[in-house]
Amino acid sequence: MRVALDRLHSGPSLLGCRQVYDEMTMTSPTPAAATANPPLPADWRDLIALTKPRVMSLVIFTGLCGLLAAPQHIHPVLGFTAILCIAMGAGGAAALNQWWEADIDAGMKRTAQRPLPQGRLDRTTARDFAGVLCAASVFLMGVAISWLAAAILAISIVYYAVVYTIWLKPRTPQNIVIGGGAGAFPPLIGWVAATGHISAMPLVLFAIIFMWTPPHFWALALYVKTDYAKVGIPMMPVVAGERSTRRQILVYSILLLPLSVLPWWLPGDEHAGAIYGVSALALSSIFLGFAIRVGLRERTGPDDTMKPEKQMFAYSILYLFALFAALVVDRFIPL
Amino acid sequence: MSKTPKQHVPQSVDQIRRGRNRVLALSLGAFVVLIFFISIAKMG
């Protein structure tokens, strides 16, 4: 087992990783133990936990805002279906992520309580559940809403489960920068579900989440970096060091400010109004304030509670909720 | 007397299966209702 873990963390090929992991999971329980205690069937609560419901809430919200902010109105039933498909797709992709990273999750304090590392769910059930969710979400989106929205949904699932989880995350500290695109798809899908086409506004919304993801995630990575180092994931604070990560948080937050205000200045009838513009300016300025505090400080020592980083992470979630809520409010109360 | 582990495990398995089947049945029922309403919405 120890040898297998060492091989896994010394950076073998992806296929090698999977083979090592399969060896570990297949050889861990002894045949006698397996006969005495047959594995319990998967509890539905564990299947729900596999979909990362808390992450999904942000995905659903941004998808809903993209749908509501679109200039065309969609039938409420079809709108509900589109959001359901986005949720199912996000849940399926999250389940695929947990299926692939069960060994990594087991080594991190933050994720060790998940159903797969805890052994409450077997990997085959998790993989099948994820596959059914992903396929059903894309199929339903295509049949009920539009095949363009379904295609973008399928791309977002592949982007998160394959490009980010399997390819980028174990290889490069830029994983979250490029992989952040996966979380940026929901408003684009929501918008396309309502309008049937891609235009400038949903692309700007995509860009806002894309630019927001690195400072949001690196604020978290700064205070859980020992966990990432332990399991061999090359997160930015582990590879480039804390100082470089803090400077990059600052750079991305500076770029986020004008980008978040851009929907106010877009030409044509799609642009957002003053409610959104002023809200974006205020929210992004506060975000930048947190980033300056995190970007210019140094860790005081091993006893540092990392309070500014934790506050920035918490605010970054509130920021995205508030920004997209302002977009919808602005659409319904134009000034 | 008190339940032995052997008696407890099948009961837990049964409870888990029953819970999962109930959720699956509800999900499938909701899916059928959703398809019905999607059809109505698309026809409208």
Image (spheres, rainbow, N blue to C red):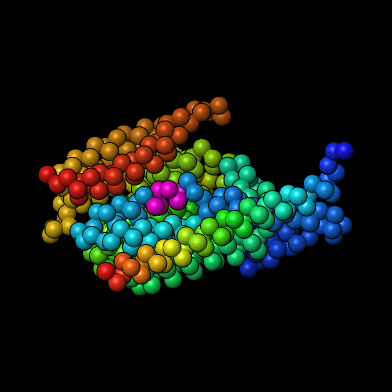
Q: Magenta segment: does it hold A57? A: yes
Which residue corresponds to the image point at 55% horizontal and 62% vertical from the top-left? A130
- Please indicate, yes or no, whether residue A234 appears anywhere in the rendered image: no
Q: Is residue B10 left or right of residue A11?
A: right
Q: Position of residue A299 (x, y in %)?
A: 48, 31
Quarter of the figure with residue A19: bottom right
Quarter of the rendering occupied by the N terminus of chain A: bottom right
Q: Is residue A69 left or right of residue B29?
A: left
Q: Residue at x 31, y 66 (%)?
A: B41
Residue A235: image location, x then y, percent: 51, 49
Is there any visible trace of residue A289 in the rendered image? yes
Could you say where residue A302 lies in the image, as x and y percent from the top left? 56, 29
Residue at figure coordinates x 62%, y 55% from the top left? B20
Tell me the chief SS of the magenta region. Answer: helix
Of the pair B4 and A203, the residue shown nearer to us: B4
Position of the C terminus of chain A by quadrant: top left
Write down the region rendered in magenta: A55-60
> Would residue A275 appear left or right of A256 to someone viewing this image?
left
Measured as percent of width and height from the top left, residue B25 is found at 56, 60
Q: Is residue A314 above or below residue A191?
A: above
